[in-house]
Amino acid sequence: MRRAAAMRALLVALGLAALAGVGVGLWGRAGAPGRDAARDAAPDALAPGAPPEAVALAYGRALYASDPEQLWPLIATADRRVKDRAAFARQLHVPRGFARDAVRWLAARVSAVPLRVEVAGDRATVTLRWRLPDANAPPVRELLLDWDEDRLDALPAAERARILGRLAALAERGALPVVEGDETFTLVREAGAWRVLLGWAEGVRVRFAVVTAPGLPLQVSVEPAEAVLAPGDRLRVTVRATSTAPQPVTARVEHRTEPAAHARHLALLLCPLFVPVTLAPGETREFASEYLLLADAPKTLRALAVTYALRPAP
């Protein structure tokens, strides 16, 4: 059995790693492709007064779909005091267009069987056995054009319908690839409704900054400037650079994470700035990076500082 942080990372990875163009190692086991007719309801089909295991399932589906509108109401008030709704939405990579429709179609087929439900007053511990569509499996990636959002958005309506139909056919005949694993969540009851407790109050505050070498003609900013992450949380960070030079400017970026002894706990999943970038005179470009706070981050870790250092490239 793994910690809930590992499950959160897995749900996000399966739903979104393909969209980010990165490979993410998965814990758990690849399940035999199988049918999942028991729980095909949409992620938002949560009845008032739902039991804690149903809330945990709805949370998992919404996390797989990277749907902040569905996730936010399922998160405990103690966590929402630490991170506001806008900050939470910014840290997700929300797919767009047909990619969003396809991910949410897969998310509706996330299922979970309760293995253990313990309720003590207004606190519950729920262990679920999850069964998740593998969005990175070759049969799915091939149908979804390797999750290229631009190519997917360019498809006509008839082709989009054909792709969803093929996915449905895979599910119907038990050939939709899945990943399985057991996970435990803590929930609290608030005003009669169960909410998932993520522990953001004990999370790691990560600050981001940009420094440029003297004389480098670039105006650079980073957003967000800081975020609070619990183990298993992902964060999307955008660096915006504008050239102020009358000729092309080429810069190289160095990433520094401090304290260095804990840098390995913040994984950089995607970054287009690993290679030098060139900006034309007056050009503005944005570069998006994806970070993941790993599940093995020690409980004593409270803060990290990430610096993007830009210098001229030869």
Image (cartoon, rainbow, N blue to C red):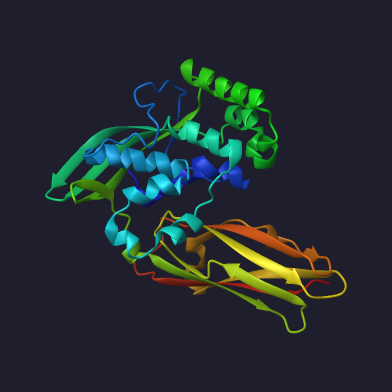
Q: Is residue 67 above or below residue 166?
A: below
Q: Is residue 126 above or below residue 42?
A: below
Left or right: 119 in relation to 176: left
Q: Residue 81 appears at what percent x and percent y?
A: 32, 64
Question: In this rendering, does residue 3 appear at all?
Answer: no
Identity of the residue furthest to the left in this view: 121
Which image quarter: residue 99? top right
Residues 314 and 112: in front is 112
Residues 235 and 313: in front is 235
Left or right: 47 in relation to 30: left
At horizontal 42% and vertical 39% (from top left) the residue drawn is: 28
Left or right: 227 in relation to 283: left
Residues 276 and 265: in front is 276
Q: In this view, does 256 lie above or below 152?
A: below
Left or right: 14 in relation to 58: right
Which image quarter: residue 251? bottom right
Identity of the residue furthest to the bottom in this view: 214
At horizontal 29% and vertical 47% (from top left) the residue drawn is: 185
